[in-house]
Image: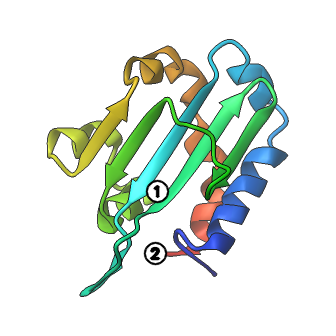
Amino acid sequence: MLQFLSPEWLQAFDAALRAEPGLGARFAASPIAIAQEVANQTGTEARAEPVRYVVVLDGAGGRVESGAGAPPADVTFICDRATAAELARGEVNAQRALTSGRLKLRGEVDRLAAASSALAGLGDLLESLRENTHY
């Protein structure tokens, strides 16, 4: 099992995106880079630095980048670890998390609307990752 948000989990997420042959065609007309910043806390332990990664979806396909070499994001999702896990498991959608104040957005939010049809169905692509993840 992969630990949610661990370096191994990010590698598996990246591999799942790179293995999908149709992503390049889906995002060629509406490329987007979506970052997620998750407060890095477990139970009572909190660290200063959040977990941050960028999902890049463009004409070349999909990939996950993190660290100093990650590209700038068009839009960034910011939340705590519990909310990130619920989003990843499909237990709550982003709109509900936004309206409840558990999720914040930064950047060019209108880019999400422009890429919405291409973004539809990404959850199905990541089903095997969800099944192999410990949250």
Q: Give the alpha-carbon distance from disc 2 to disc 1, as whole Å.
A: 9 Å
Residue with the most extreme bottom position: 44
**Image quarter of residue 48:** bottom left
Q: Which residue shows up at 75% across the image and 31% down it? A: 23
**Image quarter of residue 38:** bottom left
Q: How is the image coloured?
A: rainbow
Look at label 1 and name its amino acid: Ala
Q: Residues within 10 Å of mark 2 (few under 14, many from 20)?
A: some
Q: Are marks 2 and 1 in contact (CB under 8 Å)?
A: yes
Q: Quadrant of the C terminus?
A: bottom left
15 up-or-down from 106: above or below: below
Q: Quadrant of the N terminus?
A: bottom right
Residue 75: horizontal and vertical position, in percent? 44, 33
Q: Which residue is mark 1?
A: 88
Disc 1 element: helix
Q: Is residue 24 left or right of residue 120?
A: right
Look at label 2 and name its amino acid: Tyr
Residue 89 seen in this snapshot:
yes
Q: Which residue is mark 2?
A: 135
Total marks in image: 2
